[in-house]
Image (cartoon, helix red, strand yellow):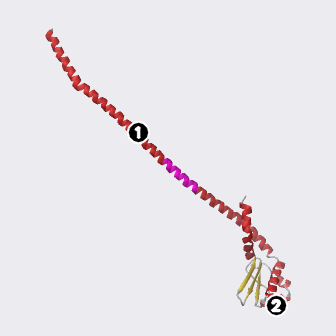
Amino acid sequence: MKGLETGRDKIQKICDILKKETLEPAKQEAREVVENAHMQAAEIIKEAESKGKLLLLEVEKEIEEKKKVFQSSLQLSCRQGIELLKQKIEEELFDRQLSEVVAETMKDPHLIVKIITSLLASFAEKGIEDELAVLIPKSISPRSINALLLSKDLERLKNQAVEIGDFNGGVQLRLKDRKITIDISDAAVRELIALYIRRDFREMIFSV
């Protein structure tokens, strides 16, 4: 019996030695591997979170920059659109109406005769004796104007009669010798009036 116990003790000692020298270091190494893995995973997660935050900041910055560009472009487009609308309103409401009013007024034969006689009287006072050509609107008969002019005024004109011009209303008077044309046609009068009242018109319409 004593020999049997001695053999068991030896076996136990061998097992203890194997456990101490092999299993326990292996367990310790395994624990260290697991701990290192946890630490590495924590570092990876931390680094990923940091990169994620930086990426998010970059995306937000890019979105904000694009937003500013879009807003600037939108504001510019709005200003251009409003200005274009103002121009359209001015052309349709102001220029067209002014053109119609001036053209209709400047087609009046009696007004045309008054302009001609006033110009001829002014030339006479200043001693201007150039050969004169008086042009009237193409829509008016020269005969109707000639009939309203005094004979002394007709004598001042080339061929003692008015001529047809290429305009819709008013008068053009040409001094042949001086090569000068005095333009009181509807287009010239319209531009002259527009210079003085366009600003008032824009303030009245667009300042509301």
Task: Give, as a three-letter code, the residue at label 1.
Answer: Lys
Predominant SS of the magenta segment: helix
Q: Position of residue 143 (x, y in %)?
A: 82, 84
Above-or-below relation of 91 to 208? below
Q: Residue at x 72, y 67 (%)?
A: 199
For the residue carrying disc 2, how many other residues have a C-alpha within 10 Å: few (<14), some (14-19), or many (20+)?
Answer: few
> Which of 111/199 is in front?
199
Quarter of the figure that contains the N terminus: top left
**Distance between the Cα atoms at labels 2 and 1?**
107 Å
Tag 1 secondary structure:
helix
* Residue on which the image places disc 2: 155
Please state, as top left, top right, bottom left or bottom right, where the C terminus lies in the image.
Answer: bottom right
Residue 158 lies in what quarter of the image? bottom right
Q: Is residue 170 magenta?
A: no
Question: Left or right of 146: which side holds 167?
Answer: left
Q: On screen, 144 above or below 196? A: below
Nearer-the-camera pick, 95 or 165: 95
- Disc 1: which residue: 46
Q: Which amino acid, mark 2?
A: Glu
Residue at image point 63% right, 59% down: 79
**Can residue 160 be seen?**
no
Could you tell me residue 123's position as x and y percent?
Answer: 79, 87
The residues colored magenta run: 59-72
Dot 2 or dot 1: first in sequence order is 1
SS class of the residue under badge 2?
Answer: helix
Does 79 sit above or below residue 193? above
Q: How many residues crowd mark 1 within 10 Å: few (<14), some (14–19), many (20+)? A: few
Q: Position of residue 70 (x, y in %)?
A: 56, 54
